[in-house]
């Protein structure tokens, strides 16, 4: 078992979202006081309803674009786990201004508030989109290309701002470059839903999921429990060399979209045999998408002691089970 954040005051921004609410749940299990800051633009109240009666959970209905909300949220906080962002490459292409306001202005607000409140550790969600047009595989933290979308620009700027705040203000910052996270509580709804919950929803409705491209594009799909582990490790590490660094948060394996879809079909069919007959369709490639993504996790293993607990197929089984039961 890895070391967990315990007996701390922890702020989770975006705490009602998919990743944020899973973090809140796990933190509460190990005797932390958890503050959740969310404006519910993409998060869901249903994700945090079980925590509202917990005296160690405090919800702030606020917005990281409002500096006053950020200052309120960080009071007496030991660790910030910053998850709040507007995700999705297509969303950023459709509305780059909104993505910029949340992901850059909001991020800067949180850094300023954390600095002013003398927060010890600031762990933030970075993104594999930062690798941009770099074709090297596996992706190594120190080798990035040029960004391919407004979203990627914002997440790279986060890393630059975090570095500067660490350098000039002594804030202990650690970035986690998430690779295609999936699992329980991930919403299948909306125009910008991630591929796994969206495809599960399609299959369960006997509708053909549409793969962008010919299905050969590949991703390092990462189950939520691995992401939770990385947040705990980043929040507790005493390795001074890890401070100010960014770490790939992934499994270190890649799966094509067609392989992924076949796995989803396989495990969903165990709950509903009719799903086995649902056809898969193919559409055009999506603007801003990179063909292949595969993380090197060596840096996280070496510096943080990270060992991914859940590989893809087991994660798919767990995820399918959650969706069929909820």
Image: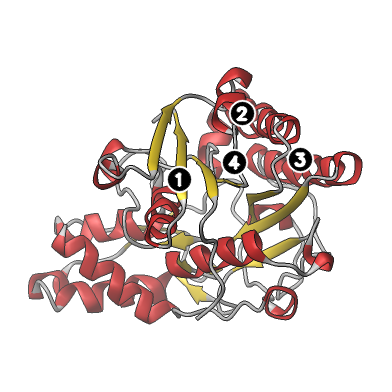
Q: Are marks 4 and 2 in contact (CB under 8 Å)?
A: no
Q: Quadrant of residue 215?
A: bottom left
Residue in the foreground of this view, choosing between 195 and 110? 110
How dense is the environment of label 1, judged by Cα within 10 Å: few (below 14), some, or many (20 and up)?
A: many
The Cα–Cα distance between marks 1 and 4, rounded to whole angstroms, is: 9 Å
Q: Which mark is residue 34?
A: 1
How dense is the environment of label 3, judged by Cα within 10 Å: few (below 14), some, or many (20 and up)?
A: some
Kindly identify the residue that appears in the image at 56 percent across and 73 percent down. 3
Residue that carries the numbered disc 3 in the rendered image: 157
Query: With respect to residue 161, does 281 lie above or below?
Result: below
Q: Are marks 1 and 4 in contact (CB under 8 Å)?
A: no
Query: Closer to the camera: disc 3 or disc 1?
Result: 1
Query: With respect to residue 324, does 299 lie above or below?
Result: below
Colour mapping used in the image: secondary structure
Q: Are marks 4 and 3 in contact (CB under 8 Å)?
A: no
Query: Closer to the camera: disc 4 or disc 2?
Result: 4
The Cα–Cα distance between marks 1 and 2, rounded to whole angstroms, is: 31 Å
Residue that carries the numbered disc 4 in the rendered image: 77
The earlier-in-sequence mark between 3 and 1 is 1
Query: With respect to residue 190, does 182 lie above or below?
Result: below
Q: Which mark is residue 96?
A: 2
Kindly identify the residue that appears in the image at 53 percent across and 46 percent down. 9
The earlier-in-sequence mark between 4 and 2 is 4
Kindly identify the residue that appears in the image at 53 percent across and 67 percent down. 4
For the C terminus, the image quarter is bottom left
């Amino acid at each position: 078992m890895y070391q967990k954040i315990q007996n701390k005051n922890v702020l989770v921004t975006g705490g009602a979202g998919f990743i944020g609410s899973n973090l809140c749940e796990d933190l509460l299990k190990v005797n932390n006081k958890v503050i959740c800051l969310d404006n519910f633009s993409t998060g869901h109240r249903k994700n945090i309803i079980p925590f509202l009666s917990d005296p160690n959970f405090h919800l702030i209905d606020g917005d990281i674009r409002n500096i006053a909300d950020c200052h309120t949220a960080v009071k007496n906080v030991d660790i910030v786990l910053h998850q709040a962002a507007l995700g999705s490459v297509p969303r950023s292409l459709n509305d780059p201004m909104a993505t910029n306001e949340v992901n850059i202005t909001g991020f800067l607000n949180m850094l300023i508030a954390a600095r002013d409140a003398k927060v010890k550790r600031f762990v933030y969600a970075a993104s594999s989109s930062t690798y941009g047009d770099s074709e090297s595989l596996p992706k190594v933290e120190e080798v990035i290309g040029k960004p391919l979308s407004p979203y990627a620009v914002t997440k790279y700027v986060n890393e630059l701002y975090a570095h500067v705040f660490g350098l000039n203000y002594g804030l202990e910052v650690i970035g986690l470059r998430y690779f295609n996270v999936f699992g329980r509580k991930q919403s299948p709804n909306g125009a910008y839903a991630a591929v796994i919950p969206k495809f599960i929803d399609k299959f369960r409705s006997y509708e053909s999921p549409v793969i962008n491209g010919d299905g050969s594009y590949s991703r390092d799909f990462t189950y939520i429990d691995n992401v939770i582990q990385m947040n705990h490790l980043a929040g507790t590490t005493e390795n001074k060399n890890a401070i100010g660094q960014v770490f790939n948060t992934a499994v270190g394996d890649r799966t094509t979209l067609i392989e992924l879809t076949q796995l989803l079909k396989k495990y969903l069919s165990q709950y509903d045999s009719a799903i086995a007959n649902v056809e898969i369709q193919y559409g055009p490639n999506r603007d801003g998408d990179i063909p292949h993504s595969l993380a090197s996790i060596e840096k996280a293993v070496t510096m943080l002691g990270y060992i991914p607990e859940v590989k893809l197929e087991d994660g798919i089984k767990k995820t399918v089970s959650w969706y069929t039961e909820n």
